[in-house]
Image (cartoon, grey):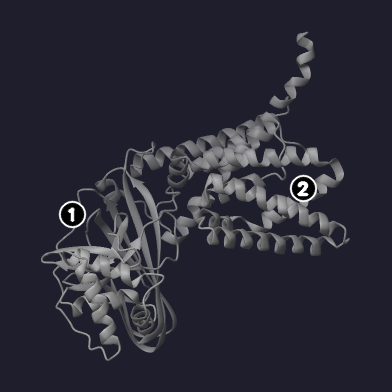
C-alpha cells in the first residue's frame, strides 16, 4: 500500500486544526459560551426520570417539583413524555402532571430543570402545616413519652428540641424503648421523628432534598425533617441533626408526596445532575443550543444522565495526549499503552492519595498471587480469570478493613477498573519472568507517574470546561496526537547516552 505523502499528512492535520478552531469560535460567538473557566455563574441541570408499569388504561402521574429557594433560582423547566399531556401547576403545592387516555407496559417520563446557583436567592417563607396527632397503643405510648421527656428537659426551643430528639433516636446503644419505636417504624426514622414532634405540639413534617454532586446518575432523594418555631423553620438531617447546607436542593418542601401514579404500579423516580457554566442569565435562557443546528456539536441537548457520562469520556483524549507526550518525547516506559489513562480516571473517582496507595497494594498482592498461579501451568484464559477474581477479593478485603478501622477513604478503592488491574498484573508478571524485577519497577513506576500527570491534566477545571463545552477540542487533540505520532527523533531520556561527547 502506497504511503501518504508528507504534504497530504500535514494537510490533514491542518484541516483537523481548522475544523476544531472553527467549531470552538462558533460555539463561543454564536452561543456565548465563555472560553475561560471561572467567568461564569454555576448552573445545575437536574433530570428526574419516572418509571412505572401502566395497567392498560388511563394514567395520571403527579410529581412534586422544586421552586426557587435559598441558593437557587429556577431558570427553566421542561419535560419529555411522548404521548402524554404535561402541565406545570403552580399553587401551594407546585407539581408536574402527566396524563394520557391509555397506556400499557413500562413507561418512562422525563422532567428537567435548570437552576442558577445564586447567593442572592432567599428562602421563601413556607407556612407551617396543621398539627396532627398519632394514637399510639401501649407500650409505644409510654416509649414516646419517655423519649419526649428526656429530649424536652435538655432543649430551649423547638429547634434544639428536634435536635435532641434526633440524637436520642440515633444512638447506637439506645435504650429498649427507643429500639421498640425504631422497630415499629421499620427504618422510617423521619416519619417517626415527625410524628413524635407533632404529638408534642411542635409543627414538623418530612421533606425531600437532593444532594447535588456533579456527574451523578440514578440518585435518590434524601428524606429530611422540617421543623417550625413560630414563622421560622429549619431543615435537619435525620441521622445527624445538623442543619442542611447548600448545595442541597429541596425537591419537595411542604411534606406532600413526591410521586403519585394513578393507573400504574411499581413506580420509582431517579435523578441525574450536571454542573456547568453559563456566561449570563440571558445567554443561558435565550441562546441555549438546540438539536436543530448542524453546527452545534454539543452534548448539552442530550439527557442529563448521558451528559454526565460524556463529561468523563471526553477527558480520555486529554489523557491519551499526555501518554503520547511522555512516551514519544520523554521516553517514559509504561506497562500498556493507555492503561495509565484508565488508572487516572480511577484516581478521579477516588482521590490521588487513596488511588496511589490502593493501586500499589492491589498490584503488589496481585503479583504474589500471580506468581503462585504461574506454577500451576494454567491456560491463559483461566489464569486471567483467576487473577480477576483475586483482584476483586483483594479490593473487597481492603474495603471491609477500611470500614472496620473507620478509614472511609479506603472504600473508594472499589472504583478501580478490575479487568485493567488484572491485565496489568498479568503483563507485569510476564515481564518479571522475561526481563526481571528491575524492568517491572521501571514500567510500573512509569505507569504510575504517567497516571498521576494525566490525572492532573484531566482534573484541571479549565480542561474540563473546554472539553465539555467545545467539541472542537477533540479535533485539535486528534491533530496533536497524529503530529506526535510522526516524530522519529531522540527521546529526552535517551540524551544521557551522548553525554560522553561533552568530554
Residue appearing at x 54%, y 56% in the figure: 412
**The N terminus - image quarter:** top right
The answer to whether 190 appears left or right of 497 in the picture is left
Badge count: 2
**The C terminus - image quarter:** top right
Q: Closer to the N terminus: mark 1 or mark 2?
A: 1
Nearest to the observer: residue 331 or residue 395: 395
Nearest to the observer: residue 276 or residue 175: 175
Which image quadrant for residue 398?
bottom right
| Extreme residue in the top direction | 503
User: Which mark identifies residue 428?
Assistant: 2
The x and y percentages for residue 209 are: 31, 65
Residue appearing at x 46%, y 56% in the figure: 308
The x and y percentages for residue 54 are: 40, 85
Residue appearing at x 25%, y 47% in the figure: 282
The answer to whether 470 appears left or right of 287 in the picture is right
The x and y percentages for residue 184 are: 36, 85
Residue 258 visible (yes or no): no
Residue 154 visible (yes or no): yes
Which image quadrant for residue 96?
bottom left
- Say what secondary structure mark 1 lies in: loop
User: Which mark identifies residue 122?
Assistant: 1
Nearest to the observer: residue 419 or residue 441: 441
Which image quadrant for residue 185?
bottom left
Query: Crowdedness of circle 2 by 10 Å Cα count: few (<14), some, many (20+)?
Result: many
- Say what secondary structure mark 2 lies in: helix
The answer to whether 264 appears left or right of 312 in the picture is left
The x and y percentages for residue 245 are: 29, 55
User: Which mark identifies residue 158?
Assistant: none
Residue appearing at x 65%, y 58% in the figure: 418
Marks 2 and 1: in contact by CB < 8 Å? Answer: no
Amino acid at each position: 500500500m502506497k504511503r501518504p505523502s508528507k504534504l497530504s499528512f500535514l494537510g490533514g492535520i491542518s484541516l483537523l486544526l481548522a475544523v476544531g478552531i472553527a467549531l470552538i469560535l462558533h460555539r463561543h460567538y454564536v452561543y456565548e459560551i465563555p472560553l475561560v473557566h471561572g467567568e461564569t455563574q454555576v448552573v445545575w441541570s437536574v433530570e428526574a426520570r419516572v418509571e412505572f408499569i401502566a395497567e392498560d388504561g388511563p394514567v395520571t402521574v403527579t410529581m412534586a417539583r422544586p421552586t426557587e429557594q435559598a441558593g437557587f433560582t429556577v431558570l427553566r423547566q421542561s419535560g419529555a413524555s411522548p404521548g402524554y399531556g404535561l402541565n406545570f401547576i403552580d399553587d401551594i403545592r407546585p407539581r408536574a402532571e402527566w396524563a394520557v387516555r391509555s397506556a400499557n407496559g413500562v413507561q418512562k417520563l422525563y422532567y428537567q430543570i435548570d437552576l442558577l446557583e445564586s447567593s442572592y436567592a432567599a428562602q421563601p417563607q413556607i407556612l407551617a402545616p396543621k398539627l396532627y396527632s398519632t394514637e399510639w397503643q401501649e407500650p409505644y405510648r409510654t416509649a414516646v413519652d419517655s423519649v419526649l421527656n428526656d429530649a424536652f428537659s435538655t432543649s430551649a426551643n423547638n429547634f434544639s428540641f428536634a435536635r435532641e430528639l434526633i440524637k436520642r433516636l440515633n444512638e447506637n446503644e439506645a435504650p429498649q424503648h427507643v429500639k421498640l419505636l425504631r422497630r415499629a417504624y421499620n427504618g422510617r426514622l423521619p416519619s417517626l421523628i415527625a410524628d413524635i414532634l407533632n404529638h408534642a405540639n411542635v409543627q414538623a413534617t418530612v421533606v425531600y432534598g437532593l444532594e447535588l454532586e456533579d456527574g451523578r446518575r440514578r440518585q435518590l432523594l434524601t428524606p429530611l425533617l422540617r421543623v417550625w418555631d413560630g414563622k421560622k423553620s429549619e431543615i435537619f438531617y435525620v441521622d445527624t441533626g445538623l442543619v442542611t447546607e447548600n448545595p442541597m436542593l429541596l425537591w419537595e418542601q411542604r411534606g406532600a408526596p413526591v410521586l403519585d401514579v394513578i393507573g400504574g404500579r411499581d413506580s420509582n423516580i431517579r435523578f441525574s445532575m450536571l454542573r456547568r457554566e453559563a456566561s449570563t442569565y440571558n445567554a443561558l435562557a435565550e441562546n441555549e443550543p438546540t438539536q436543530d443546528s448542524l453546527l452545534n456539536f454539543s452534548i448539552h441537548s442530550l439527557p442529563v444522565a448521558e451528559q454526565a457520562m460524556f463529561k468523563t469520556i471526553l477527558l480520555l483524549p486529554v489523557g491519551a495526549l499526555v501518554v503520547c507526550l511522555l512516551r514519544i518525547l520523554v521516553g517514559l516506559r509504561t506497562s500498556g499503552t493507555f492503561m495509565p489513562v484508565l488508572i487516572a480516571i480511577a484516581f478521579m473517582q477516588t482521590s490521588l492519595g487513596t488511588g496511589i496507595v490502593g493501586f500499589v497494594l492491589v498490584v503488589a498482592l496481585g503479583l504474589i498471587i500471580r506468581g503462585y498461579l504461574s506454577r500451576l501451568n494454567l491456560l491463559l484464559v483461566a489464569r486471567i480469570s483467576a487473577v480477576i477474581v483475586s483482584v476483586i477479593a483483594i479490593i473487597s478485603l481492603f474495603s471491609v478493613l477500611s470500614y472496620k478501622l473507620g478509614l472511609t477513604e479506603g472504600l473508594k478503592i472499589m472504583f478501580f477498573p478490575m479487568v485493567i488491574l488484572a491485565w496489568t498484573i498479568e503483563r507485569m508478571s510476564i515481564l518479571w519472568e522475561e526481563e526481571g524485577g528491575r524492568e517491572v519497577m521501571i514500567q510500573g513506576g512509569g505507569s504510575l507517574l504517567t497516571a498521576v500527570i494525566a490525572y492532573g491534566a484531566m482534573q484541571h477545571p479549565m480542561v474540563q470546561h473546554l472539553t465539555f463545552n467545545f467539541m472542537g477540542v477533540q479535533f485539535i487533540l486528534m491533530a496533536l496526537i497524529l503530529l506526535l505520532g510522526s516524530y522519529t527523533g531522540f527521546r529526552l531520556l535517551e540524551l544521557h547516552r551522548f553525554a560522553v561527547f561533552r568530554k
